C-alpha cells in the first residue's frame, strides 16, 4: 500500500483516532502523546496509510532526524512502513523504537537486519487503576493546586521551561551530565498550539500556585474517552520548589481530575533506565506500577 504525506491538523486527529481505535494496555502510544507533540509535527517527515473505503488512516509513521522512525501500524502493514522508512532514509543508520510486546514488528525488524541496542535510554510504561484507592493530594502550607485559567498561557509555558531547563535535567541524571545553561524550547506560542487542539482540556491541565501567587508546578492529563484511559504527561516542578511533595500532589490532583472526567485507568511513560530515575520514583509514589517497555532497534 502506498502512503501519502501528512499535511495538517486534521491528519493529526486521524492519527490520534487510529491510536484510540487500537488502544490496549500494550500500546506504544496514547492519543495524548501525539497531542503533546503537535508543535513538532511540522518538522517531521510524516506518512499516512489510508483505507479509502473506510475513509480512515490505518497506519502512520514519522521520521525525526537523524533517521529515527516512530510508527503505528497493524501487523499486515509493518512491512510497508519499514519499506517507506528504508526509502526515505536510504544510506543512513536507521533507528526504530518499539514496545517489546509488538511481536509482529519485532519479528519484521529482526528479519530486516535490525538489532536491539543497549546504548540508548528506554521508556517504562506504568499503569494505575483510577479507583477508590486514589489518595487525596496533600500540599505543603500555602500552596494550592488548581486547573490553569484562561489568560495564563505565558505563565504556564514559563513554569514548564523552569522545570525542563536542560542544566537541571543534566543534574538529575545518574551520573550528572553537563547539558549547558540553555532553555527548554517551550514557548507561549508552542503551548497555544497544544491547547487549541483535541483532546486538550484545560480542566485536566493542573498548576501549583505558590504562596506568592506564582505558578511553580504542572501536570497535564489527556483523556481517551472511548477507552477511558488517561495519560499523565508531562509533570514538572520549578527546582526552586522541588522536593517538597509538589510533584506527587499535582500528579494526584490530575489523576483525580481524570477520574472525575470518566477515566478508569491511567498510563505514564517515564524513563525506565537507571540514568534518569526520578520521574519513575515519583510515579511509583502515586501508585503506578511497571508494565511494558520500549526497545530501540538499529541497523
Ligand atoms: C520529577 C519532578 C516533577 C519531581 O518534582 P518534585 O516536586 O521535586 O517531587 P516530589 O517532591 O513530589 O518527590 C516525589 C519523589 O520523587 C523522588 N524525587 C524527587 N526529586 C528527586 C531528586 N532530585 N532526587 C532523587 N529522588 C527524587 C523521591 O522519591 C521523592 O520522594 P521523597 O521526597 O519522599 O524521597 C521534578 O524533578 C521535575 O520537574 N523534573 C524535571 C522534569 C521531569 O523529568 N518530569 C517528569 C517526567 S514527565
Image (cartoon, rainbow, N blue to C red):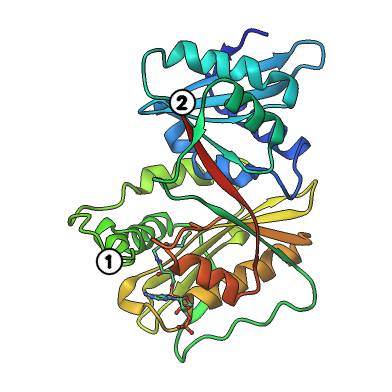
- Gap in angstroms between the C-alphas marked 2 and 1: 30 Å
Where in the image, quadrant-wise, is ligand 1 located? bottom left
Q: Can you see residue 217?
A: yes
**Label 2 belongs to which residue?**
63
Provide residue 292's location: percent of width, then percent of height: 65, 52
Spot occupied by residue 22 in the image (x, y as percentages of width and height)? 76, 36
The secondary structure type at the circle numbered 1 is: helix
Relative placement, left or right, of 29 versus 189 is: right
In-front residue for pair 193/230: 230
Q: Quadrant of the C terminus?
A: top left
> In which quarter of the view is residue 5 placed?
top right
Closer to the chain start, of discs 2 and 1, is: 2
Residue at 54%, 14% in the rendered image: 84
Q: In the image shown, does 292 or 229 lie closer to the viewer?
A: 292
- Compare residues 268 and 144 and report the one nearer the observer: 268
Q: Which mark is residue 171?
A: 1
Q: Residue furthest top?
A: 2
Of 75 and 143, which appears nearest the observer?
75
Q: Quadrant of residue 76?
A: top right
Count numbered badges in the picture.
2
Residue 114 location (% of width, % of height):
51, 27
The correct choice, above or below, for 24 with respect to 105 in the image is below
Q: Residue furthest left?
A: 181
Is any atom of residue 197 visible in this view? no
Amino acid at each position: 500500500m502506498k502512503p501519502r504525506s501528512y499535511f495538517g491538523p486534521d491528519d493529526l486527529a486521524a492519527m490520534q483516532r487510529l491510536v484510540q481505535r487500537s488502544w490496549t494496555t500494550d500500546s506504544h502510544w496514547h492519543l495524548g502523546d501525539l497531542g503533546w507533540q503537535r508543535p513538532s509535527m511540522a518538522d517531521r517527515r510524516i506518512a499516512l496509510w489510508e483505507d479509502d473505503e473506510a475513509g480512515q488512516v490505518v497506519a502512520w509513521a514519522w521520521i525525526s532526524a537523524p533517521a529515527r522512525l516512530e510508527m503505528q501500524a497493524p501487523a499486515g502493514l509493518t512491512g510497508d512502513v519499514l519499506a517507506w522508512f528504508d526509502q526515505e532514509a536510504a544510506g543512513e543508520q536507521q533507528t526504530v523504537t518499539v514496545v517489546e510486546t509488538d511481536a509482529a514488528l519485532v519479528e519484521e525488524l529482526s528479519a530486516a537486519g535490525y538489532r536491539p541496542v543497549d546504548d540508548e535510554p528506554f521508556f517504562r510504561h506504568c499503569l494505575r487503576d483510577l479507583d477508590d484507592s486514589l489518595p487525596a493530594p496533600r500540599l505543603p502550607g500555602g500552596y494550592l493546586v488548581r486547573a490553569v485559567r484562561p489568560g495564563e498561557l505565558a505563565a504556564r509555558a514559563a513554569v514548564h521551561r523552569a522545570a525542563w531547563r536542560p542544566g537541571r535535567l543534566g543534574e538529575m541524571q545518574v551520573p550528572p551530565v553537563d547539558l549547558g545553561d540553555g532553555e527548554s524550547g517551550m514557548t507561549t506560542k508552542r503551548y497555544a498550539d497544544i491547547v487549541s487542539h483535541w483532546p486538550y482540556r484545560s480542566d485536566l491541565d493542573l498548576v501549583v500556585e505558590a504562596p506568592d501567587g506564582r505558578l511553580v508546578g504542572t501536570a497535564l492529563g489527556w483523556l481517551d474517552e472511548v477507552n477511558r484511559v488517561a495519560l499523565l504527561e508531562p509533570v514538572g516542578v520549578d527546582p526552586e520548589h522541588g522536593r517538597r511533595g509538589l510533584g506527587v500532589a499535582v500528579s494526584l490532583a490530575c489523576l483525580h481530575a481524570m477520574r472525575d472526567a470518566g477515566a478508569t485507568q491511567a498510563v505514564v511513560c517515564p524513563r525506565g533506565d537507571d540514568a534518569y530515575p526520578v520521574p519513575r520514583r515519583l510515579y511509583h509514589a502515586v501508585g503506578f506500577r511497571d508494565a511494558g517497555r520500549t526497545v530501540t532497534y538499529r541497523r
